[in-house]
Structure formats: structure tokens, C-alpha cells
Amino acid sequence: MNLLNVLLLLPLAGALITFLLPRKSPQFARLVALAIALITFAGGMALATNYRVGGPPQFVTDVVWVQSLDIHYHVGADGIGLWMIVLSTLLAPLAMLASWNSITSRANDFFALILLLEFALIGVFSSFDLFLFYLFWEVSIVPFIFLVGIWGGDRRMYASLKFFVYTMAGSVLMLTSMIYLYTKVKTFDLPTILSAISSGRLVLSPTEQTFLFLGFFAAFAIKAPLFPFHTWLPDFHENAPPPVSMLLLKMGVFGLIRFSLPLFPVAARDNAPWIIVLSIIGILYGALLALSETNILRLIAYSSLSHVGFMVLGVFTFTQLGMDGAVYQMINHGISTGGLFLMVGLLASRRKSTAIDAFGGVAHVAPGLSTAFLITTLAGVGLPLLNSFVGEFLILQGAALANFRFAVFAAIGVILSACYMLWLYQRLFYGAKPDRTYPDLDVREWLCVLPLVILMFWLGIGTQTFLPAITGSTSHLLDDNRQSIPFRVEAARAR
Amino acid sequence: MLANPPASIEYLRFLPEIILSIFGTLLMVLNPLIRKQGSSIFGNLSILGLATSLLAAIYADSLGGEAFSRMVLNDDFASFFRVLVIAIGIVIVLGSYEFLSRERADTGEFHSLILFSVAGQCIMVSSNDLILVFIGLEISSIATYILAGYLRDDRRANESAVKYFLLGSFATAFFLYGISLIYGATGSTNLSDIHAFLLSPGRPAMIVGISAALMMVGLTFKVSGVPFQIWAPDVYQGAPSPISAFLSAGPKAAAFAVFLRIFLTAFPSISHQWWPVVWISALLSMTIGNFAALTQSNIKRMLAYSSIAHAGYVLVALTAHSDVGAAAAMFYLAAYACMNVGAFIVVSHIAGKGEHNVEVSDFKGLGLRQPVTAALLTVFLLSLVGVPLTGGFFGKFYIFQAALQSNMIWLTVLGLLNSAVAAYYYLRIVGAMYMQDASESTPVPQPLPPGTQLALLLPALGTIVLGVFPSAVLDFAIKSANFLK
């Protein structure tokens, strides 16, 4: 059986098993869920090591699911999705470990939902059929609303309903675009549609392209989120259990790269200017809000808004460097922002608060946690040798190639990110010795933190492990994109 | 007319209706003879009758053709809806065991009325003649008027029954007026004859349009589409919950079947006149239903408004006036029956004696108290929202696909945005069950009796199968939609 199918099947089966395990012994359910997640992670590693750089998507399964509508179960891994799949398989067991003791009520359900979420995430990153993608995209919302709504903070119900209605509003517009495309080509299979476009069998007028593009864009911009569609994000992160926040991977940006660009090459370029403006506003606005925020989780949420701005900017520069940087930054975001959420969760569990005021001088009592947090902070602000530097550098370079002003504005965002992150670190960890002592990281917590810290260094130094696979797929994507609109682009370049 | 007595195969083509009528009469007769309180013999008999007629309906599918001077048309379309309405009947009877013993109201009358109503619906969906459609409609309607007021001592049920009866009679009168006009214009009540007549030159356009409009009024009332939806919230709220479940599924499915049959068989040639009207009705039904449901705190009323919205979705499929649209409407009605009946039966279970616990806040903490009930209701609600892997999603998807194929872009966009609005109120119930803790005033639910368990498992299974493996039902719907013309 194809490895990717195993990766999809394992968490799904695991979720069902964990749901059905006896509720009297939550510890057993936790162990079973963790074991399944770890086996899935091993599968993810095998996927990464067996992936050959370049060429078409690998580990492909393509079978017809609904004959009369030509819906396929078509999954595969290419360089854009590969690392996100592996990242999902890594973050799921880490999220479980991180919530091992903090989730006490209905532990079975929590761990089962994490596995269900992992299933949906892997599905999103591996679908090559529009319908299948939409399916996983929507299914991924369901575990989120329960994870936030049941185990979240004070305003959990508000946050989870807001998240759901927002994403649903975007998704249905995407669905409209998908169905419209279907009525034109009579298939939902992405490669088939793309070949129909490149061979000229499917011709969409510029107006059609624009509206279809906007339909997809609505879903992705809300999910990413891009300014001004971001207002659900701070509420979500403030109320979600921090390990759950960690799993909110950047599906929106991924969707832009996988679907919007190849399907609507002309519209993507035509609309690029205002999208870039929105992402630059997002970079700066997110950073400024983060500076003024008094809650740690909301601060990280705004920093995440700022990061998304970078990614979208990278995508819409239409340069190899920018695109690679965006994909790289998608991975980085999962690791460094995920790591921040993880550690804030550990911190919050010691003090039962997420207000910045509640802390100070933590470095005196918990040096291990402080060191790990410092590394993650530095990774977040883009210190060389750590992961985000690579992504941000590539994006800035790409932006400078496209238009130097973009790079200038974005670079201001980098500076601001150093301000708010270092200031946060100072307020949390330095200062007078606190009046009470917290325990430092124990073995379980080190096990959550260490893989992420190692990856921060690995992604920062061993770039060659990750980048060739990404470039192999993005260069292909950009080539196709360019061929679809040869003249206009060249003309614009010449000017 | 009976120069040629009907051949025996014609009776076989009409077998489900015959069986249902026999069992219905039998129950009526047994009612005064069996006076043992608390026995479920009536329920069991009516399940037996429904199950037999279900088998007969499946058997009759292999005997396609006309019967009784071309009044009955036993095609795949008829079989699809016969199976659907009989299956709804079975689930309703299963789900009402609990209600009937709780209210100490178990009589043969209740079950015989259900059987007669299902028989009426079967007649509606399998008739190819407006007179027979009308007879079926009346059999079904009169039984449901009585059922809505089945609890004689309950004032809300009485209000519900009177409202339903008065407004329903008006609607059927409109329908009948339409039939009489079309008979005057074309000289026939047979749908195929009307179609053939309308294709010939020199047809009286005006009067045909008016009669189609009058019939549309009657049918829009029956499916609770805007602007004839006002009765639905009051009736669904006042009627006993299992009956509300029945009203929202069975008669509605049959009325939509008739809607499809009449307008796609008899009136396709004047579709340019009627589809814009249905377009408006569809949009308004979705919008008014969903927005009104947003503010409801009574779940029965909320589900009533939601059923108006769902009628709007099916009307979207009608608006498409195509084979794909008809197939989409059929699929959606099957999915809708599963999810809505299931949801109402959960409400009936939680409502308790006298149906006092029907507020959203009465569902607080259900996720911990009764995990299985809560999980099943969640499946139904997610399907009503339209989350993938449920029948509700696939149905909605297919409907809007049909609409886009007929180039109704705005209707699609607005309709789908509507379902994002709808997500909010369905999720409020999910939120109450899982995200809020039960307070002291929250009623403690009784354990699920076996009948209700089965009545919840069957629709849940249906919802999931339609969402994951839609092909079988979808292909059948596509195949039978082709027969309409």
C-alpha cells in the first residue's frame, strides 16, 4: 500500500479507536493515541527520505471516487506539500505530549480529535483533486471547533463559532468557484484541469478568471489570514489550548500556491498589486498590534498575522526566490510560532495566566525553559543560523527583484518583529526574581521542546536538506505559470 | 370507463399503496378491540405494514409501467420516492414509541393515520394524473392535520392543527383550481397529454400560465417555500416532535416529487415563465429561513425555520429545470430526510414529558451526560450545516452544481453564503451540548429507549453513507430523473 495512504489511514483509524476506548482509563487512551501518532511520524520520515527531488508528484494514488461527477481520490506529495505533511506528522505527537497533563476532562476525545485533525491536515497538503481538497479543508475545521470550544479559555464558544463562521463564509465562495470550474471541464482532478488549461481546451475569459480567482482567494485569505480578514485569529489563539494553536498550519498560503496560481495565472498576476499591498499592511499592522498587546497568546497571534504577510508577499512576487521563501516560511512558521505557542502553554500551565504582567524574572527559576524560549524568540525574529532567517531572506530578495519598495516595507516589519519579540522576552523572563518558584522543564516537556529547537537550527543551517525539494516543485509551477501568459509578463519586465 | 378491467400486473404496480391502506384500515379496526395500555402492538403492526410495503415498493420497481388507465405511472422516479417516504414512515414510527408511552397516548389511531399519510404520499409520487395527485395529496394532508393535533389536551397542538388545516385547505383549493383550469384549457388531466398538447401550435398560453401558477401556490405551501411558509414555524412548534419530524420530511418530499413531476413532465415547454418565479422563491426561502432561525431559542422553531431554508435549497434545484436539477433535488430530499428526522427525534427524546425542554439551553452539557445522543445529534447538525462526508454536504454540492450548469451564478453564490449563515445557529446547539456545562436547572435526560436508538442510528447511517458513498443513490437519481420527460 502506498505510504501516503498509510499516513492518511493511520490517524483516521487511530481517531476512531481512541474515541471508542474505555473512558475510565484516559491514560491508556493517551498512550494509544501517542503511539499511533508516533508511528505516523515514522511514516512521515520515511516519506521524506524516500522522496526524490524534482519531477512530478510522488506517492500518487488516483482512483475514481464518484463516477458520475468525476471526483477522484487523488493524493500525492510534491515539494510544496511534502514538508507540510511531515510537519503535520511531527506536530501532532508534540501537541499530544504538551497536553498530556493539562487536559484532564474527556482526554479520550481530545486525543482522538488531534488525530482527526492530523488526518485532515495531511489530506489538505496531499490532495490533487479540488473536491477532495475542499473535503479535507472543511473536515479540518471540525476538530478545531471542538478542540477550542471544549478545552479552550473563557470565551471559547465565541472564539470557536467565530472561527467556524468566518472560514465557512470563505469556503463556500471557494466551493462556488470549484463547481463553476467543474461545469466547464467536467472534472475535479487538478492535473487534468491544468493540462486542459495549458493545451487550450479550457479557456476562461479574464472576467471569469478574476471572479474564480477571487472565490478561491476569499477562502485562502480568511484562513491564512491576510489583513483585513484576520479578526478571528487573535480570539482563536487567545482561547484555544496552546498545543491546538500549534496545529493551525498555514493552509491558506498553501492553497494559494497549490491552486490559485496554477489555475488562474492571468488573474493571479493582475491582482498581485493589491494583494501585495494587503500583505505589507498585514506585516506592519500585525507587528504594531503585537507591540501594544498585553496578552502573550494574542501577541503571538498578531506576530503570526505579520508572518503570513511575508509569505503572501513572497508568493505574489512571482519570483523563484520569493516562492521558495514563502514555502520555507510556511514550514518555519509551524516550527517557530508553533514552538512559541507550545512554550507559552508550558509557561501558562505554571501560572494559570497568559497576561504578560503576570510574569517576570522567570529566567531565575526556570533556566531551561528560558533558554528554549530565547532560541525560539530569536528564530522568530530572523537571526541568522536559525530557520526564519532563511525564509525571510529569500522573500525579501524576491520582493526586491520584483519591486524594491516592497522589500523596504517588509524589512521594516522584520525590525518591528525584533522589537516586540525581544521586548516580550524581556518582560517575561528578566527582571526581579519572582515571589514564587516554578518548576523547570521536566523530561516530557523537554521531549516536546527539543525536536523543535533542533529543527530551528537544522532549517537554519542545513538548508540543503529542505530547499531542493521545494525549488524542484516551485520552479515547475512558475514555469507553467509564465508559459500561460508569455507576452504580458515579458512586456512588463522590459518596461 | 372500465370497459377493460385492470390487468393483474397493474395491481402489482400499485402494491405498496394497497398494502399500506390494508394495514391502516386494520389498525383502525383493531383500535377499539385492543384496550391494553402500554402495549406496543399497534406500533409493531404498523412497522410490519410499512416494512411489507417497502419490500413491495422495491418489487414494484421491477414492474415498471402504467396502471389504471394511465393514472399511475410506476417508474424509477416513483420507486425512489416511495422507498423514501416509506422509510421515513418506519423511522418515525420507531421514534414515536417513546413519545407515545411517555404521553400515555398509544393508540391504533396514531399509527393508522401515519400509514394513511404515507399511503397518500406514495399515491402522490406515483401518479401521472392530476386528479390522482390531488387525491393522494388530500389523503396525506388530512391525516397529517389530525396528527398535528394528536394530543387533544395540548393547546399548542390544537393551535398547530387548526392553523395547518385552515391554511392547508386554502392551498389545496388553489391547487384544485389550477387543475380545473388546465383541464378546461387542454381537455386532460394526464400529465403526458398536457405536455403533448402544449407542444402543439395554437395553445391558449394565458390560461395555462395561470393554472401553472395556481398549482405552484398549492405546492409551494406544501413544501413551505416563501411566500407561503408562515404556517411552518407555528405548526412544527406546536405539533408533537415526532410528528414535526414527519411533517418536515415525508409530506415535503412527496410534495417536491409532485412539484418535479408536474413542472418537468407537463410544463417544460413554458419553463421560461415559471423558473424566474421559483428563482425568487428559492432565494427568499433560503434567506428568510436562515435569518429567522438565527434568533430562535426554541429548537423546534429553529428547525422549522431551517426546514424553510432547506426547502429553498431544493427549490434552487427546481430552478435549474434540468435533469441534473431533478436528480439533485431527489438526492437532497433523501439526505435531508435523514438528517432532519434524526434531529427532530433527538429533540423529541430530550423534550421529555409534555415537551417542556425544547430550548437550546436545555441541551447544555449533553455531551457529557449522554455522549451517544449528543454525537448523533452532532452528525445530523453538521450535515444540516453541510460539512463534507455527510449527505447534507453532498446534496447541497450537487444542487449548486446543477444551478451553475443552468448558469445561475448569483443564486449559487447567495445560496452558499446562506449556508455559512446557517452554520451559526446549528453550531449553537453543538456549542450548548459540548462547550457549556449543565447547570442545576438543566433537565436530566432519560436513557435512550431501544426504539429511539434504532430511529437515530438508521438516519445517522443514512447521513454518513450518503456523504461518503453517494454514487449508488446518485446514479439511481440521475437514471430516474431522465424518465420525467
Image (spheres, coloured by chain):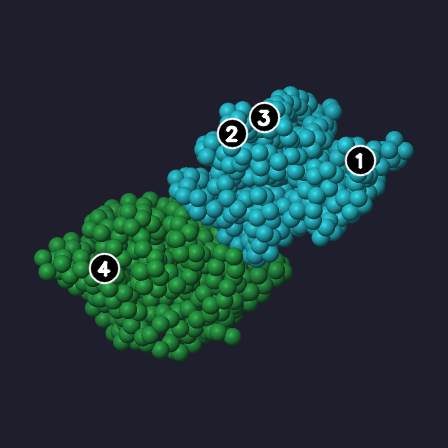
Dot 3, how many residues are within 10 Å of its Cα: few (below 14), some (14-19), or many (20+)? some
Of callouts 2 and 3, which one flags the residue occurring earlier in the amino acid sequence?
Answer: 3
**Residue B135 seen in the current view:** yes
The alpha-carbon separation of the residues under discs 2 and 3 comes to 11 Å
Q: Which residue type carries mark 3?
A: Ala
Subunit ID for the residue under disc 1: B
Q: Nearer the viewer, mark 2 or mark 4?
A: 2
Horizontal side, residue B18 vs residue B175: left or right: right
The alpha-carbon separation of the residues under discs 3 and 4 comes to 59 Å
Q: Is mark 4 on a helix, strand or loop?
A: loop
Of callouts 2 and 1, which one flags the residue occurring earlier in the amino acid sequence?
Answer: 1
- Name the residue that disc number 2 marks: B202
Q: How many labels does the image show?
A: 4
| Chain letter, cyan | B
In the rendered image of the structure, the colour used to display chain A is green
Q: Which residue is drawn at 44% across and 40% down?
A: B415
Q: Which residue is drawn at 69% across and 49% down?
A: B64
Given residues B345 and A230, the one toward you in this image is B345
